[in-house]
Image (cartoon, rainbow, N blue to C red):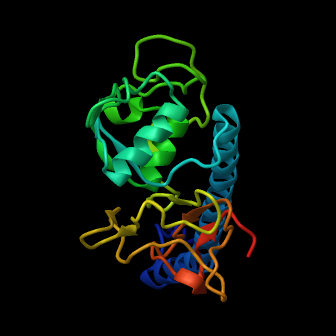
Amino acid sequence: MMHRTTPRQGFTLIELLVVIAIIATLIGILLPAVQAARQASFRASASSDIAQLSQAVEQFKATYTVKYLPSGFVATNSYTNGNVQHDDSRTYLKTTWRNTVGPLSGTTYSSTCPNLGTLDGSQCLVFFLGGPGWFTGTPERGLAAGSNPFATGGERKISFDFPAKRVSGGRFLDPWGQPYFYFSSRDGNDYGYFGLYYGNSTGGYNAGTPSNVVPLMDASGKFQNSHGFQIISLGKNRIFDGNSRRDDQYNFAN
């Protein structure tokens, strides 16, 4: 007489545990590689952003025949004569966007500039390279020399095509969600001409950083890229590493 064997249904508990252990081991092996590839992609993206921003700054300077794009700026509809930061900002507007400031007479100067207050370097990049519309809810496509960027119509061109999803508070964010920090020399080794910096304390630009962010210097106390500008990403740790730099990225060689 023949006996039929009944096929076994499913896995035993031990077999399931073995499969789970194998899957967990594979995940443990693959996850660091996936994270490393993701961070490498972020670093490459930040490097590309910084290179493109640097090119856009140079393009802007050439378009308007100016030595620098400011890393501090007062945007107001009325500039006060005798206020150093107001005078510096008003003069820059009059040099670049020529139709923005009214007659230079009296103690205040009327301006068609929106009343935004003091812009930090990150915001200056967006304001000048992408247009004031980023701050007024109607992003523009750049501006042409001699045109009035605050008037309707007129010839416009873009210096940098900011992706809307990565602009927050008028600042362009790096892949880790922190602003690209921007500093500029005005006339050689004078990065502090506007007298402001990024920080988390009164007197500095509050960009949500855990520590102050300042222009980098070399061992002799001279600003890096002393006659140009600095664009800095804080990198994965989102902390300004200063001269130790660690994972910070920037637009200059040493």
- Residue 145 is drawn in which quadrant? top right
Point out the image quarter for the C terminus. bottom right
| Residue situated in front as seen by the camera: 68 or 171 | 68
- Residue 162 visible, this orientation: no
Above or below, 16 against 82 in this view is below
Residue at x 53% of width, y 71% of height: 215
Q: Which residue is depicted at the point 68% across and 47% down?
A: 52
Q: Quadrant of the N terminus?
A: bottom right
Taking the view exactly as shown, the residue that stands out farthest to the right is: 253
- Whether residue 134 can be seen here: yes
> Residue 243 appears at what percent x and percent y?
58, 84
Dividing the picture into quarters, in which one does residue 104 lie? Answer: top left
Q: Position of residue 192 (x, y in %)?
A: 48, 67
Q: Residue at x 56, y 67 (%)?
A: 190
- Quick check: 241 left or right of 102? right
Q: Tell how many labels.
A: 0
Q: Nearer the viewer, residue 17 or 145?
A: 145
